[in-house]
Image (spheres, rainbow, N blue to C red):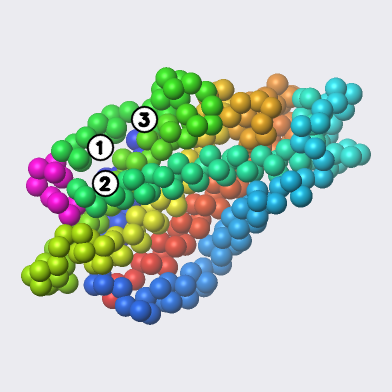
């Protein structure tokens, strides 16, 4: 594997793309990937954590022991293990356990959705630039390079500030941040694939460009791009939480981990463990997605 200069602006996350794209995937390739992935215990553990978090988000209304919006000024800032509050209460007396469970919905949504949209758009742009080559590649990639002049954090803050606070605008801002690096990875992989013998053979047989890209290029390019995109989910969650912390993302009283960190920052001296819980959830989720991405990349890192 070789590093291509495709770091997320301002975050120094280098994309790992194959130095030599193998021949077309054989029928047993993905079975081998699954076997190698299962042998990686850390990656399997991370996958279990991610699945548990997704299930918690889906079934949050049934799992939450209390109403996450019910407040009581007489029960504010209760400690962990207090009667009726397994993980304490926040500055308004709301149950922290319930808010953490329900908050997983927005936190995961804000972390995953921008990456999914950027994956679709960025892959399409990268495929077009990589397969076309020439002046089309130059125009597209030089336009992509413009976004690398801005650190991703500042770019997300600037876009959210210009568009206004809110979930939709935060999603748009994060999507714009992640399209350039994904497009660059897709372009780098496609540029290598288009020179392969099976692509040249398909071109010589009279197949049109759309058929070649759909049948021969897309299937071999999606793997590396997908692995890189999964590594961006952790970054997306951190950026989304940061926007909410600054008041540019999710608005109160919606439960979201970044927003909860913001509202609990004044309680750091009275109930530090309660105030640290949203940050711990962000850390655990981000690490799980990173380890899962590393496991998938290692399992796919086999030449045929």
The residue carrying pointer 3 sits among few (fewer than 14), some (14 to 19) or many (20 or more) residues within 10 Å by Cα, namely some
Residue 254: x percent and y percent?
A: 66, 31
Residue 202: x percent and y percent?
A: 14, 70
Residue 3: x percent and y percent?
A: 29, 52
- Range of residues picked out in magenta: 130-138
Question: Looking at the rendering, which quadrant does residue 261 occupy?
Answer: top right
**Is residue 276 toward the left or the right of residue 199 in the image?**
right
**Is residue 124 toward the left or the right of residue 158 in the image?**
left
At 45% from the left and 52% from the top, the residue drawn is 230
Q: Secondary structure at mark 3?
A: loop
Q: Nearer the viewer, mark 1 or mark 3?
A: 1
Location of the C terminus (image quadrant) = bottom left
Give the labeled residue for mark 2.
125
Q: Nearer the viewer, mark 1 or mark 2?
A: 2
Whichever of callouts 1 and 2 sits on the residue coming sooner in the sequence is 2
Q: Are marks 1 and 3 in contact (CB under 8 Å)?
A: no
Q: Based on the picture, tell me whether residue 83 belongs to the magenta stretch.
A: no
Give the labeled residue for mark 3.
151
């Amino acid at each position: 594997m070789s590093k291509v200069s495709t770091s997320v602006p301002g975050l120094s996350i280098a994309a790992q793309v194959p130095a030599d794209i193998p021949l077309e995937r054989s029928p047993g390739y993905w079975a081998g990937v699954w076997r190698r992935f299962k042998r990686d215990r850390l990656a399997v553990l991370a996958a279990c954590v991610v699945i548990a978090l997704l299930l918690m988000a889906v079934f949050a209304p049934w799992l939450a022991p209390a109403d996450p919006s019910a407040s009581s000024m007489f029960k504010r800032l209760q400690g962990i293990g207090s009667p009726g509050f397994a993980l304490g209460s926040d500055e308004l007396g709301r149950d922290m356990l319930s808010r953490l469970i329900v908050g997983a919905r927005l936190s995961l949504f804000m972390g995953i959705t921008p990456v999914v949209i950027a994956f679709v758009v960025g892959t399409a742009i990268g495929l077009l630039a990589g397969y076309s080559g020439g002046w089309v590649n130059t125009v597209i990639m030089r336009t992509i390079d413009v976004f690398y002049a801005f650190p991703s954090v500042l770019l997300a803050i600037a876009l959210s500030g210009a568009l206004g606070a809110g979930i939709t605008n935060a999603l748009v801002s994060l999507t714009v941040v992640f399209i350039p690096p994904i497009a660059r990875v897709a372009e780098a992989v496609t540029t290598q694939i288009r020179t392969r013998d099976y692509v040249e053979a398909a071109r010589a047989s009279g197949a049109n460009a759309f058929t070649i890209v759909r049948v021969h290029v897309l299937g071999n390019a999606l793997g590396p791009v997908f692995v890189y995109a999964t590594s961006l989910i952790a970054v997306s969650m951190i950026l989304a939480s940061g926007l909410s912390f600054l008041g540019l993302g999710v608005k109160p009283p919606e439960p979201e981990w970044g927003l909860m960190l913001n509202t609990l920052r004044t309680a750091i001296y009275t109930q530090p463990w309660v105030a640290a819980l949203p940050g711990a959830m962000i850390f655990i989720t981000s690490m799980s997605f990173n380890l899962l991405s590393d496991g998938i990349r290692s399992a796919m890192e086999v030449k045929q």
